[in-house]
Image (cartoon, rainbow, N blue to C red):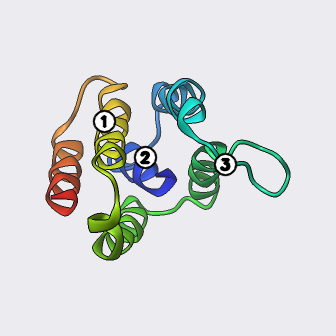
């Protein structure tokens, strides 16, 4: 999910503060309450989404590379994911895309690819 949200936020070449704010809100309000696992340090595993996003931004990763990782994962795992998880991925990506001046052409393209992969 971190790769996915990063790929959407970075598709236009920069990550706006509003996109970061939406990511943090989403993790805190939507993902943490749904996550049932903690990492080895006792931290809610949902925070891994924010951590992954931060790592990608810190490394100035290309949006396309982050999306390629998502595509590779979903190519093998999408049929195994519950519908609620697929919907959460699509909604999360859409919310991040819409958080800064609505959804632009590049973001529409990546959301279309995500919909096609998720089936």
Q: Where is residue 4 in the image (x, y as percent from the top left)?
A: 40, 53
Question: Which of 26/84 is in front?
Answer: 84
- Structural distance between the alpha carbons of marks 2 and 3: 21 Å
Note whether 36 is above or below 100 in the view shown: below
Task: Name the N-terminal-most of marks 2 and 3.
Answer: 2
* Residue 56 point in image, percent of width and height: 57, 57
Q: Which of marks 1 and 3 is in front?
A: 3
The crowding category of the residue bearing disc 2, from other C-alpha atoms within 10 Å (few below 14, some 14 to 19, many at least 20), is many
Which image quarter: residue 93? top left
What distance separates the C-alpha of mark 1 from that of mark 3? 22 Å
Farthest right residue in view: 41
Measured from the top left, where is residue 101 in percent x and y? 29, 23
Image point (60%, 54%), residue name: 52
Compared to 18, does 67 lie above or below?
below
**Circle 2 residue:** 5
Which residue lies under the disc numbered 3? 37
């Amino acid at each position: 999910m971190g790769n996915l949200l990063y790929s959407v936020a970075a598709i236009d070449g920069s990550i706006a503060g509003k996109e970061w704010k939406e990511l943090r809100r989403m993790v805190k309000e939507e993902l943490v309450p749904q996550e049932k696992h903690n990492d080895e340090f006792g931290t809610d595993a949902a925070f891994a989404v924010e951590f992954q996003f931060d790592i990608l931004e810190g490394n100035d990763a290309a949006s396309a590379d982050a999306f390629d990782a998502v595509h590779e994962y979903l190519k093998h795992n999408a049929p195994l994911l519950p519908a609620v998880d697929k919907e959460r991925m699509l909604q999360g990506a859409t919310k991040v895309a819409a958080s800064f001046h609505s959804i632009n052409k590049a973001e529409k393209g990546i959301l279309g690819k995500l919909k096609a992969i998720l089936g």
